[in-house]
Image (cartoon, helix red, strand yellow):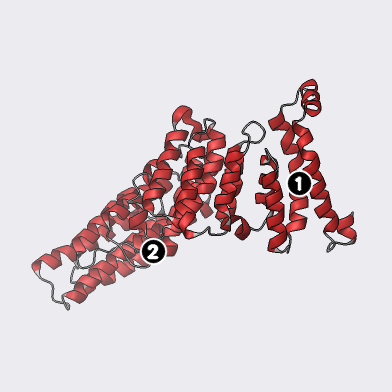
Amino acid sequence: AGMEVAPHLKESLNKNFFDFLLTFKQIHGDTVQNQLVVQGVELPSYLPLYSPAMDWIFQCISYHAPETLLTEMMERCKKLGNNALLLNSVMSAFRAEFIATRSMDFIGMIKECDESGFPKHLLFRSLGLNLALADPPEGDRLQILNEAWKVITKLKNPQDYINCAEVWVEYTCQHFTKREVNTVLADVIKHMTPDRAFEDSYPQLQSIIKKVIAHFHDFSVLFSVEKFLPFLDMFQKESVRVEVCKCIMEAFIKHQQEPTKDPVILNALLHVCKTMHDSVNALTLEDEKRMLAYLINGFIKMVSFGRDFEQQLSFYVEARSMFCNLEPVLVQLIHSVNRLAMETRKVMKGNHSRKTAAFVRACVAYCFITIPSLVGIFARLNLYLHSGQVALANQCLSQ
């Protein structure tokens, strides 16, 4: 009520908080402990009941509060023994920049907390959420990760582990190289594979993948992360696996600036696109088919072997065999092969050698074989017209 009447007068909240600090020790006294035993309530279940009220008080106090007040509140919490509950509320409510610059102080306070009252992994999760929003001092970054991961990797419960690891993946991606990211992914695989624990954690695993691809725009670097593809293998449920593949392809189309012929990228993305294509069945909606075709076509357009036209045609032949159920992809492949034939003509300045004549005939034959498999009549007619013009320009009338 006080905040509604006079939102700028925070003195009452400050007193409220400091009074709470004075009475907080009673929670660990015999009277409260005996009452909890009578009620059959364990302390780890009881303490979080204070969190909503404490979070609200801290949020009101910390809003536009001067640095000195926040520092004073932090120091008072530090003096209070067994203060995990308060520490969690502080990290949830205070500005991320304030928390990040004092990360090592908070880690020291977390270490001193009693594990029985409030789990330490929740405290490290709250710290990780802040570090994803604000950068800690550069000299402390590796030590922060090491201290946090020492606690996270010892967690036995898969849900506790993945909820914490998911947050710290972003911090790792922001401040470290593919080596550290690979180590983190390997640890996640190690914890989530036994007893197929990953089946209960698909949202968190998806979040990890999205964070990794959001920070690695160079796909040759991304796919050189040794544990990235094994990480994808944990997505056993088809619908989830397809969603992850779509995220990867959307990132590739958005961030890949230059055409590529990198075999690591091509093999990995062909596998990703094949996964999307193979999910298409009689019940797949047309909108979904269009989206998948758009993503696969985006990949096909970004593949270029330069002047190695034969290798380019071989890629299109392989793509046709892999993506035969999506008509827009076949249309794109036919246009790409026609363009390849005309590029060959341009290089030879209209005068084909025996070798290039055989090559353009192979291109025309590719189109002639592929067009009849299309369902749309007008699409077939247009492609026959275009392919016929290409054949005529390259003196391939027999084809």
**Coordinates of residue 375 in the picture (x, y in percent):** 41, 54
Which image quarter is the N terminus in? bottom right
Residue lying at 81% horizontally and 25% vertically, measured from the top left? 35
**SS for callout 1:** helix
Amino acid type at image mark 1: Met
Residue lying at 23% horizontally and 59% vertically, measured from the top left? 313
Name the residue nearer the viewer: 375 or 147. Answer: 147
Can residue 283 be seen?
no
Amino acid type at image mark 2: Gln
Residue lying at 53% horizontally and 49% vertically, measured from the top left? 285
- Horizontally, residue 9 falls left or right of residue 173, namely right
- Horizontally, residue 378 falls left or right of residue 207, namely left
Neighbours of disc 2 within 10 Å: few (<14), some (14-19), many (20+): some
**Coordinates of residue 355 in the picture (x, y in percent):** 11, 65
* Above-or-below relation of 350 to 177: below
**Coordinates of residue 264 in the picture (x, y in percent):** 29, 53
**Coordinates of residue 195 in the picture (x, y in percent):** 47, 27
Name the residue nearer the viewer: 129 or 251. Answer: 129
**SS for callout 2:** loop
Q: Quadrant of residue 348?
A: bottom left
Q: Which residue is mark 2?
A: 256
* Above-or-below relation of 339 to 55: below
Q: Quadrant of residue 21?
A: top right
- Mark nearer the N terminus (2 vs 1): 1
Residue lying at 77% horizontally and 56% vertically, measured from the top left? 60
Q: Quadrant of residue 393?
A: bottom left
Q: Which residue is mark 1?
A: 54
Which image quarter is the C terminus in? bottom left
